[in-house]
Amino acid sequence: MIKRVSQRDVIGQLLQDNNMPDTPTARAIYRKMLERDDDDTQIYQKPWVELTDAEIDALWGSWMRPYAQMVSDKLKEKNG
């Protein structure tokens, strides 16, 4: 679950992490940085990779394939 935080909290944390004084000027600089629209930013999402039948057989034996497939399907469902 992603925790939502306010811009004010983020700026406060940035000031603290960088040992900066909490002044209106410092807050304005960080606010400007956070508000900057960065079109080059992309969210990277790794592709789903399943275990092969050979990998399942090596780990648990061929009798486990149906169960491994059920677990894989459920994980796909939960992780989109």
Image (tube, helix red, strand yellow):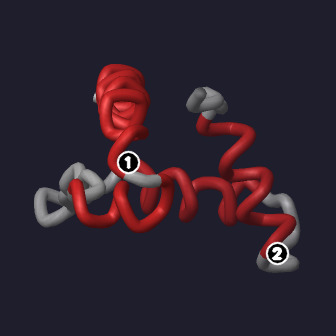
- Please give left or right for residue 71 compared with residue 7 in the image: left
Label 1: few (<14), some or many (≥20) within 10 Å? few
Q: Quadrant of residue 23?
A: bottom right
Percent x, y for residue 59?
A: 48, 62
Percent x, y for residue 37?
A: 23, 52
Query: Considering depth in this image, is 19 or 2 the residue closer to the camera?
Result: 2
Tell me the residue at 64%/30% (across/down).
3
Q: Which residue is tagged 2? A: 20
Tell me the residue at 49%/54% (across/down).
60
Q: Earlier in the sequence, mark 2 or mark 1?
A: 2
Mark number, residue 35: 1
Query: Identity of the amino acid at label 2?
Result: Met
Numbered disc 2: secondary structure: loop
**In this view of the protein, can residue 11 be seen by the observer?**
yes
Q: Between marks 2 and 1, how big is the CA–CA gap?
A: 19 Å
Instruction: Pick the quarter of the image with the C terminus.
Output: top left
Percent x, y for residue 29?
A: 55, 64
Query: Identity of the amino acid at label 1?
Result: Glu
Mark number, residue 67: none
- Please give left or right for residue 75 compared with residue 16 in the image: left
Instruction: Pick the quarter of the image with the N terminus.
Output: top right
Label 2: few (<14), some or many (≥20) within 10 Å? few
